[in-house]
Image: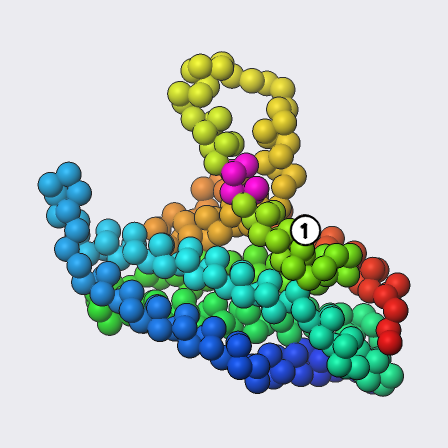
Amino acid sequence: MNTTNPIAKIAKFTILDEIRQRSFVVMFIVCVAFVFLARGCYRGNYVVNGVALDAATVVAAVSKAAFHVIAVVTMLIAALLSMRMFRRDRDGGMQSAILSKPMTRRHYVLGKVIGLWVLSALFMLILQAIVLLTVVISAGVAIPGYPVAALLCCLNLLFVVIAVLLLSLFMPETAAFLCIMGIAVVGLIIDGINALGGSQMAQAMTGPTQTLSLRKILYYVWPKLSGMQYFASSFIGGGGFQGLRSVYPLFNMLFYCLILCVLLLWRFRKEEIV
């Protein structure tokens, strides 16, 4: 059989199986409803320090806020879908049925990863597309960088899917979900501390440091979920590439996705199939 054919079949089955779940449909309808309810924010009049904000400023601020909310919610949904995937397939006999066919464990794992990633990415991209269309229709303002930001944020979803699937092989599924949430929260704190430590006020108080501090080590080593999201959102405000430091979260997440995928394939080879 073609090597990619079994992977594509398992990915397609995974997507269709999740779409048929009532809970997934309910989550999607609720998210779409909230996005539509937020359209009134683009038509509001906002005043800061006695100065009325122009439409472009309001659209950029509201769009960034909507972008971050959708990205975080979609990561939560991706983690929820991934944490029970292996257990549900095992308890339902799906794993043994699939692996009894001319398919390897690598095909099965990669198919599940791709299926969950594509499904969660489509979930997020549809919501982001609704926001973009709402901006164009309600405010008459186009945001060229918004699609780029949404596509870049899909890398966070891939990390979440792979990491939760891997952790679910070592611990209860709820613990795997909480671990990923903990990684995201700790990463956000580390980024905040690093930004505070690099400010001019902090450098004036402590003086310039030449050594590699623990703060910097954690900043470069920890998975940069929040850093990747803020890098993606910079395209909404007309930012984007601002030197190698701004692009580092992209390489960090690519590295972690690759390493975790290798670990997932290695660990699943030792899993008992019943």
For the stretch drawn in magenta, the main secondary structure is helix
Q: Is residue 42 left or right of residue 253?
A: left
Q: Is residue 44 left or right of residue 71?
A: left
The kind of residue on which mark 1 rests is Tyr
State yes or no: residue 156 in magenta: no
* Of the pair 263 and 91, the residue shown nearer to us: 91
In the rendered image, the quadrant that contains the C terminus is bottom right
Q: Which residues are magenta?
A: 186-191
Res 39 → quadrant: bottom left
Could you tell me which quadrant the N terminus lies in?
bottom right
Residue drawn where x is 45% and y is 42% of the image: 242
Residue lying farthest to the left in this orientation: 50
**Residue at the spot x=54%, y=45% of the render?**
185
Q: Quadrant of residue 163?
A: bottom right
* Residue 4 rendering spot, x and y as whole percentages: 75, 78
Q: Nearer the viewer, residue 266 or 243?
A: 266
The scheme the figure's colours follow is rainbow
User: Is residue 260 found left or right of 96 in the rendered image?
Assistant: left
Residue 194 in picture, x, y percent from top left? 51, 32
| Residue 60, picture quadrant | bottom left
Work out whether 156 lies above or below 120: above
Q: Residue 64 in the image: state x and y as whole percent.
A: 36, 54
Can you see residue 247? Answer: no
Whether residue 188 appears in magenta in the rendering, the answer is yes
Residue linked to disc 1: 256
Above or below residue 17? Residue 156 is above
Whether 133 is drawn above or below 8: the answer is above
Residue at 26 percent of width and 57 percent of height: 59
